[in-house]
Amino acid sequence: MTRRAEMPLRAALEVLRAERRTGDVVITSMGSAREWMAMGPLDPLDFVYVPSSMGEAPPLGLGIALAQPRRRVIACNGDGSMLMNLGSLATIASEDARNLVVVVFDNGIYEVTGAQPVPGPGVDFAAIAAACGIRSVHRFSDIDAWAIGAAAALDSPGPTVIVLDVAPVPGAVGPRSPGPTAVRGPAFAAALQRTEG
Amino acid sequence: MTSGALTGSQVASFLADAGVTHVVSLPDSTIGPWHAAIAAHPKLRLVRVCREGEAWAIAAGLHFGGAMPVVLIQCTGLFESGDSLRNVVHDWKLPIFSLIGYRSYLNQDTLPGDTCLVFTEPLMDAWKLDWMLVQDASQAGEMRAHYDRCRAAGVAGALVIAEGRA
């Protein structure tokens, strides 16, 4: 299968960072966590999901979104991770989490383990999300289109899934935890509950 | 509570009285019939998942956000969701409480030789969950005491609910 147009992962995340509003939670995992940490200081409402359980970033975001329904929660996920937990899209749709946005970074590979291809290259995550009942679904393959359309896509009536076709990062490695979970977990909870959404 | 098998209304009242806000669950033959009472309770929100691994992560998010979730799944779902449990309870050290249905404990007739009886208790211990076996609704006081003790200690506790049918 021919690969589609792709945008650089870092550039895609820079757009997201620019559109992120005060009070938004941003969950990053795997490659998105690695790049997000390299882009600058973390916000107290950034949840770098490292260490993680693969595929669980969207459910984690759903939990936060249900607990704090007035706060926008953005959960970043890879395509391999999404494949591991496709049913979570049905759960998210069922719970009708209006304030949850799942961003799927689709590069066709398991990047942090050495770029092995994911099963079923070319899986249409946007179509799957729509079929699961996700209210707003968007797909961008071009960085300029994503830069122009990001604000509107993120503001769509949720739950929302945004699929971004990104280029693999050659030689990429997995993210390192930015600190002890025993400190980061309570700090994140305190930030969430201090400024309850 | 009286003696006999737990009912949905008993479970819902137990959870609501304990301060639980969300019940994240996938049904089995015992748990499933409880869903209606849980969903109907004004102090509880039932969150239905597609696989049990989701349940632990959703509960983690709810906990971070200030809610008071429990996970309600069968032991087979415990087996399925080990990595998610490991991450939530041990990596992130979140005191997520759970109710785990213990398949075939009371009656093996429907699944003779059910290996759930072999693996459930060792796995509860392996995951270092502070668990208590519940065989009868008359144990309501003990259930609440166990829940309160786990909450006070900030540890992930569990009630392992003896089930009869698969």
Image (spheres, coloured by chain):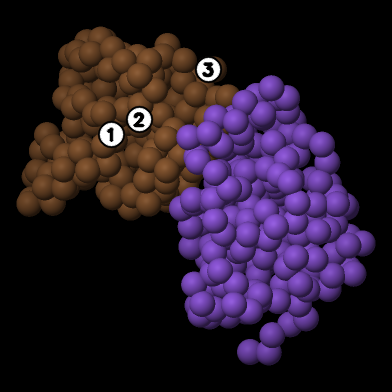
Chain colours: A purple, B brown
Name the side, left or right, on which A41 lies relative to A147.
Answer: left
Amino acid type indicated by mark 2 = Ala
Quadrant for the N terminus of chain A, please.
bottom right
Q: Which residue is mark 1?
A: B129
On whether disc 1 and disc 2 are found on a single subunit, the reply is yes
CA distance separating discs 1 and 2: 6 Å
Residue positioned 34% across, 39% down in the render = B73
Q: Which residue lies under the disc numbered 2?
A: B156
* Residue A173 shows up from this direction: yes
Q: Earlier in the sequence, mark 1 or mark 3?
A: 3
Mark 1–mark 2 contact, CB under 8 Å? yes
Q: Is residue B45 visible in this depiction of the protein? A: no
Pointer 3 residue:
B43
Does residue A91 sit above or below A132 in this rendering?
A: above
Q: Amino acid at mark 3?
A: Lys
Q: Are marks 1 and 3 on the same chain?
A: yes
Name of the residue lying farthest toward the right: A148
Q: Residue at x 63, y 52 (%)?
A: A28
Residue type, label 1: Leu
Mark 3, other Cα within 10 Å: few <14 / some 14–19 / many ≥20: some
| Quadrant (top left/top right/bottom left/bottom right) for the C terminus of chain A | top right
On the same chain: label 2 and label 3? yes
Q: Of all residues shown, which one is farthest toward the bottom? A: A2
Please tell me whether mark 1 or mark 3 is closer to you in this view: 1
Q: Is residue A44 above or below residue A88?
A: above
| Front-lying residue, A38 or A135 | A38
**What is the chain identity of the residue bearing mark 1?**
B
- Left or right side of A175 for B54: left
